[in-house]
Amino acid sequence: MLHGLMAGFAKYGTDEELQRYLRDVADHVTHTSERVDGFRQALTDILTVNATLVTQQQNAEMRALAEAGFEQNEEIKKISSWAAILFAPTLVGTVYGMNFDNMPELHWAGGYPFAVVLMAVVCVSLYVVFKKKDWL
């Protein structure tokens, strides 16, 4: 707008003092506009740095949560492995603990050693499998 007024100086015969004041105002407007642009750029840079720092912090927190989740998964694997190992003798013991008269192994002389060996074999087998998978 000021440049439009200044363009009409010669056409309308504007007073020299008014022309000087308008040029002065135009210089102030230009200077202020440049400062506003500088502040805008500085603010944009500050917001970019802030967003970057926030993202880095969130990434660090997510990495820590992922590591904690991984450690928890490892602990759950170990607990589940031990539960499976302890389940085998419990299952064999409950079958032989039912005290039915018509069980084939009930009146067999090797029934008790067979049950104990079966429990041990299953437990050791599960232990070896879980150890190879690095769950224990």
Image (spheres, rainbow, N blue to C red):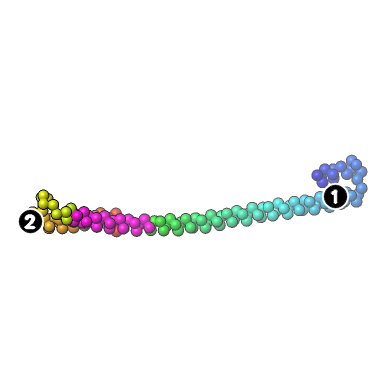
- Quarter of the image holding residue 97? bottom left
First-in-chain label (1 vs 2): 1
Q: How many marks?
A: 2
User: Where in the figure is residue 28, as x and y percent of width and height?
Assistant: 80, 53
The residue sitting at 82% across, 51% down in the picture is: 25
Answer yes or no: is residue 134 visible.
no
If the image is split into quadrants, where does the N terminus sit?
A: top right
- Identify which amino acid the numbered label 2 is placed on: Ala
Q: Nearer the viewer, residue 85 or 51?
A: 85
- Mark 1 residue element: helix
Give neighbour class at mark 2: few <14, some 14-19, many 20+ (Cα, 10 Å). Answer: few
Q: CA distance from mark 1 to mark 2?
A: 120 Å
Question: Which contiguous range is marked in magenta?
Answer: 72-94
User: Where in the figure is residue 128, as x and y percent of width and height?
Assistant: 24, 56
Q: Quick check: 102 left or right of 28?
A: left
Asked whether 65 falls inside the magenta stretch, the response is: no
- Residue labelled with disc 1: 22
Q: Quick check: 73 left or right of 5?
A: left
The residue sitting at 88% across, 49% down in the picture is: 19
Q: Nearer the viewer, residue 8 or 126?
A: 126
The residue sitting at 82% across, 46% down in the picture is: 2
- Identify which amino acid the numbered label 1 is placed on: Leu
Say the numbered circle drawn on residue 109.
2
User: Where in the figure is residue 8, as x and y percent of width and height?
Assistant: 87, 42
- Mark 2 residue element: loop
In this view, which residue lies farthest toward the top?
Answer: 11
Say the numbered circle drawn on residue 45.
none
